[in-house]
Amino acid sequence: MSPATSAPVESGANPAAPSTGGLLELNNVEVIYDDVILVLRGLSLNVPEGTIVALLGSNGAGKSTTLKAVSGLLPSEHGEVTDGGIVFDGADVTKLDPAERVRRGMSLCMEGRHVFEHLTVAENLIAGGYTQERGHVETDLAMVYDFFPRLGELTNQISGYLSGGEQQMLAIGRALMARPRLLMLDEPSLGLAPLLVTEIFGFIKRLNEERGLTVLVIEQNARRALEVADHAYIMEQGRIVLEGPAADLRENPDVKEFYLGLGEGGGRKSFRDVKHYKRRKRWL
Ligand code: ATP
């Protein structure tokens, strides 16, 4: 799908989304847990229809919190969107409950896969179609098995016995049963061997290219995510610090050094540290 064409830009303290009219837009979203813990500090991003957008950042940056805010899952964790708004397909969904968001076409594949381990593959998939009319289930199951033939072979297997890669396919398949327009993935590479990561990201790319699915993926594995994404955002401490076309970010020296491990230092420091260091250097 066609990527945006602007070069990467370093974002300011309270950045606005780069453009409007995306399938999903976050506008200056602030999230607080337990009434006091400020985690998202005015986060804006835009996911255009038909693209893959990656949200990258190190541990604790607020990536999962962002997906929970979009999916409506914050209240169960005593979290709340306290400022800003979330727009999906032109409508404000900030206050909608999670099931209504799924009905509108937003589907989340959570970190750690979260399959129902005591249920079979087929039962897991059927559970994923709970918002759909009964008549859709057979068609949608066939669609998932067509896309993931391996799941078709395992249809009556208890999910807890599946390998990590198979469970990840099942988690994605279950999300597809809701007929999403936007698929959100929380760290699909987590705990998987490199070959399986390649396979899973291959599936994500095909879902986008062959079925036109819009994808928002969050990852610590920046290299893999930047290989498949059209556009990417890098966040730290609850804010976007850099964004741009994925192809440009792959070539950005700071991203190379601090997220792709290709720098001379070899370490993974904070992107903000680089900027502070460069500012200091300019002063000297
Ligand atoms: P990771 O890859 O480690 O999951 P992340 O970028 O997804 O990192 P979040 O899980 O969103 O980050 O966490 C961001 C910050 O919010 C962390 O400091 C975390 O401790 C805090 N946080 C997350 N969930 C809660 C919660 N339910 N209550 C209080 N604080 C939370």
Image (cartoon, rainbow, N blue to C red):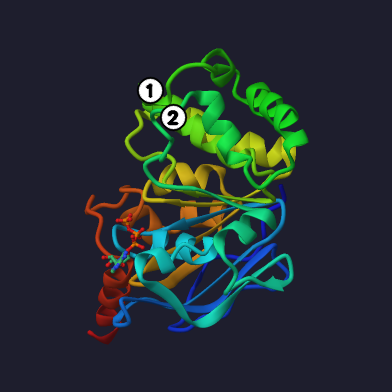
Secondary structure at badge 2 equals helix
Three-letter code for the amino acid on which mark 2 is drawn: Gln
Secondary structure at badge 1 equals loop
Residue at 51% x, 30% y: name it. Answer: 169
Three-letter code for the amino acid on which mark 1 is drawn: Ser
Q: Quadrant of the C terminus?
A: bottom left
Q: Is residue 213 visible?
A: yes
Q: Nearer the viewer, residue 49 or 39?
A: 39
Q: Which mark is residue 163?
A: 1
Q: Is residue 264 left or right of residue 242?
A: left
The residue pinned by badge 2 equals 167
Q: Is residue 203 visible?
A: no
Q: Nearer the viewer, residue 50 or 40?
A: 40
- Residue 105: horizontal and vertical position, in percent? 68, 54
| Mark 1 Cα shell of 10 Å, populated few (<14), some (14-19), many (≥20) | few
Q: Are marks 2 and 1 in contact (CB under 8 Å)?
A: yes
Residue 268 figure quarter? bottom left
